[in-house]
Amino acid sequence: MSASPLDPAAITNLTRSIRSTTGRTVPVIAPFTGETLHELPVSGVSDVREAYTQARLAQLAWARAGFARRRAILLRAHDLILQRTALLQDTVQAETGKTRGQAFEEVFQAAGVTRFNALAARRVLRGGRRRSAIPLVITATVRYRPKGVAGVITPWNYPLSLAAMDVVPALAAGCGVVQKADDQGALSILSLRQAFIDAGVPEQLWAVVAGDGAEIGGAVTEQADYICFTGSTETGKRVAAQAAGNLTGVSLELGGNNPLIVLDDADPARAAADAATACFTAMGQLCVSIERIYVQRGVADAFLREFVAVTRSLTLGADYDYSTDVGSLTSQAQLDRVSAQVADAVAHGATIEVGGRARPDRGPFFYEPTVLTGVTAAMECFAAETFGPVVAVTVIDSEQEAIVAANDSDYGLNASVFSGSVRRALRVGGAIEAGSVNINEGYRGSFSSVAAPMGGLKQSGLGRRNGPEGLLRFVDAVTIARATGLVQLPRTGRDFERLAGPMLLLATVLKGIRRR
């Protein structure tokens, strides 16, 4: 096991930026060793309220600064993220137990999100003229006004990526942010934030608070002009209900139980290698990772043989270099959850094809990537989100059976289809009820496409992050209409009587010339 390379003094300097007047701290555990990584200051409700007060003051000047100024600052932040890649990787690994490669994906994603929003904000949010019902008589212009200060609540599993995907578009749109960081991901978020502060983002504009969600989560939601939440479906529903009390808008990315379909014209070896990445990246602690595989009977034996072999060959380790393929679960609670679901499946008749055991020789929270067969509805892992390195493989006979099985879920976040025919894969993928569908890839195609929207259907969430849709979350559309005076609009009954005929004729003509 490798000790954390993080400098304790640097950690202390970062955590001082947490807004906290409680005098309390909580220990944050290093997953690789189980030892205390650092003590995190705890915020109280008054800290949250003060953070919003300061952010609102900073937001007024930030909104007035304009697109060009915000773009320049965000692009500087992008460059600093890239310059600090190694430090950010160290921080992510130390807090989450990820491998070096998986930590790099987070850094790369954060930089990409920053670049996209910096460059796209003006085009997406500049507004402009719109057609009116009576051309030349009425003009209409739409402008976008920043909502104010967004509340962003992020989990521990992907601290850089998930923070960037909500915070950066808010900043690009001219908003401020109060972010409630999970204790286990706060240091990574603070490291990312520091790059933005050093680039020129005012410190008060992006405030970070930490602490028990039951204690301060309500205050984060109560004070927000818009709320972004990533986490469990159960908690997301409570956040949405509270936000509804103030008619505050929300975007929610919630749970998933994501399917992958392997059709009988797919290359079994290639599909197996890609499926292993889709299932076991970050030890499956990713909302869009694959937990169910449906493989068509014609390639089922070959696929399962290859998939088991690839899974068995993965290197587990707690190293701050690129020598490992999979890392550690993040906490004892995660280890307990995964172990319980596997034990439940076996007790109800499932077969462990590979894995299925903890590896304390590697570290306190290590668990082998696990492939199950014979999973049925009697087992907890059949329909519930495991959020760990466990996947169930089921043989199906037809495309239609695969589609029905994939859609037989309360969730609809991500899905994947593997096939030797792109046309066939697109046809099957088009029938799956999910916010993202990847062809011949597990999740990284859609996850990395930051110019395209990402979000869930059914119990997997509301709204979209990334792309133009992700920017539009943080603004209110304002329509400004003006009477030109060329023709006086009707005021009285006689005015309407005189103008009704010409206006009906105008409507007919506009339809005829396809004018909206």
Image: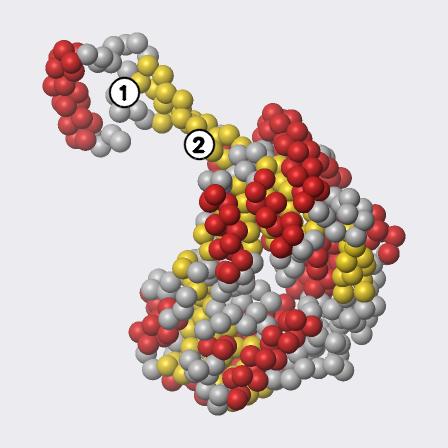
Which quadrant holds the N terminus? bottom right
Q: Nearer the viewer, residue 77 or 239?
A: 239
Amino acid under disc 2: Ala
- Residue 425 seen in render: no
> Around disc 2, counting alpha carbons within 10 Å, would you say few (fewer than 14), some (14 to 19), or many (20 or more)?
some
Which quadrant would residue 207 be assigned to in this image? top right
Q: Residue at the location (54% across, 61% down)?
A: 232
Q: For mark 2, what is the residue?
A: 477
Side (left or right) of 491 relative to 481: left
- Name above or below for residue 238 compared with residue 198: below
Work out whether mark 1 precedes mark 2 in sequence or the reverse, and give the earlier one.
1
Q: Position of residue 22 (x, y in %)?
A: 77, 47
Circle 1 crowding by C-alpha within 10 Å: few under 14, some 14–19, many from 20: few
Q: Residue at x 71, y 67 (%)?
A: 97
Query: In the rendered structure, are the residues bearing label 1 and label 2 in contact, judged by CB atoms less than 8 Å apart?
Result: no
Measured as percent of width and height from the top left, residue 50 is found at: 69, 37
Give the SS element for disc 1: loop
Residue on which disc 1 sits: 135
Instruction: Between label 1 and label 2, give the one nearer the viewer.
Output: 2
